[in-house]
Image (cartoon, rainbow, N blue to C red):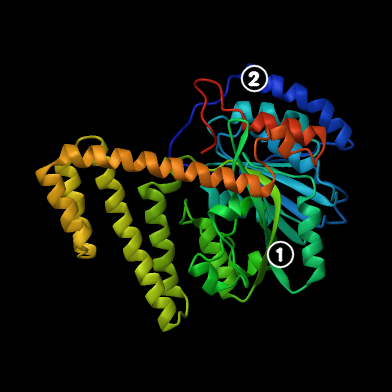
Amino acid sequence: MANSRTGVKAALPSRNIRQNARRNRETIAKLRPSMIETKAVGTQPDIASQPRGSLHQPPLVSIVIPAYNAAGYIPATLDSAFAQTLSDYEIIVVNDGSPDTPLLEEALQPYLGKIRYIKQENRGPSNARNTGIQASRGKYVAFLDSDDLWFPNHLANQIAIFESDPALGLVYANGVQIRDDQPVGVSFDRTPQSLPVNFDSLLREQSTVNTSSAVVAREALLEAGMFDEQFRRCEDYDLWLRLAAAGVRMTFTREIQIAHRPANGLAASGDLMKQALIAVYQKALATQKLTEEQTSVVRAKIANISLAIQFERAKQFLLEGKFAEAVECTDRAKAITPLWKLRLAKLGLRLFPHVLQSLYRAHLRRVENRKRAQREESLKLAGFANRTIDDVARTGSAAVSAAVRRASRPPREGAMPPG
């Protein structure tokens, strides 16, 4: 999702940003009355700030949006936030030392009277969200990544769930995944959910919180210590585990309330993400009072992820024709677990690597066809089959429909999505 990353990515052309800004001005002017802009200038985070409502009457919800390489996406994200049917909120945008800051600030210009804008040096996604939490004044904090979008009823529905059970501390929702102007999947079909949502279900990944759909009691966030800033990946999973371990009650709604752009394959399943997940589990082993069964579950997950890292490397080397390197990866995998399949794979790599390469490519095609069929069935059941993004957003305003459509377009040549 959209936050600081180690790589520097190119920004969208400024002409495209100006065009987006002009399209947004009229829409935003209709959605919300203009507010007077105030600025606080200092060596620590620069803030252009006029929160929604009176300073003496804190909003019910604080929306925290970290921004990093987000100039081409954040206008659509803000459009969807301003189109919420629940109006008692403030929006806090945290520029985490983004390389595209000039373009980002140009894109934000039409909104500066209506948002709180905080500019800081690059410190990573955890710190950016923590900055937003610390600046927030609402009873609840809602997280929204700068390339994701909300349907207009999102906040109203989440707050209604909180009001139905005041003991709740976190509520999250289902979402539709978008790519190239088309829905491509439903979040809960990729990550099945179960009740109750608690430490054990999160640990076993029987429940998975989508951060851009999460609304959390601010007090619970502060008591848990907010996001752990040592993590640049999986920082949200670590926080949900700590909240659950502290006894914070959680639940979800299966209603689709957000449009989410899934990370590309490298970002979603690369070594760095897996290594971060291992670090989260190792932290849980060191800091949480786990039962014997939970300890076994965590140790098994660490072993399986370590094995998966070697498997993925071996398969990539196989596709690239680097057979010796693939053999080395199978040897490292065997050191983790002596599976007979690993011995067979190593034998195949040594005796007939090109045959194994062809078989694996055919296997990948079958897997992709099966996944495509599953996605299509998922969309059909959710009512999104054969629809455009305009159809997906039909329940909302024209502004949100346009925002979803605009955000779903791939960036122009030379531009990169948020990190």
Asked whether, in this view, residue 278 is left or right of residue 66, the answer is left
Give the position of the N terminus as an image quadrant: top right
To which quarter of the image does residue 365 belong?
top left
In the drawing, what numbered circle is on residue 357? none
Q: Which type of secondary structure does the marked residue at label 1 adopt?
A: strand
Residue 339: percent from left, percent from top: 22, 63
Q: Residue at x 19, y 65 (%)?
A: 338
255 shown above or below 29: below
Q: Residue at x 81, y 32 (%)?
A: 398
Q: Which residue is mark 1?
A: 217
Task: Residue 123 in the image: state x and y as whole percent.
Answer: 51, 47
Residue 117 percent across, percent down from the top left? 70, 40
- Amino acid type at image mark 2: Asn
Q: Nearer the viewer, residue 395 or 295?
A: 395
Q: Is residue 220 above or below residue 265?
A: below
Three-letter code for the amino acid on which mark 1 is drawn: Ala
Q: Is residue 313 visible?
A: yes
Asked which quadrant contains residue 400, the reply is top right
Mark 1 crowdedness (10 Å alpha carbons): few <14, some 14-19, many ≥20 = some
Residue beneath disc 2: 16
Residue 34 appears in the picture as rendered:
no
Q: In this rendered view, identify the residue nearer to me: 386 or 69.
A: 386
Query: Farthest bottom residue?
Result: 292
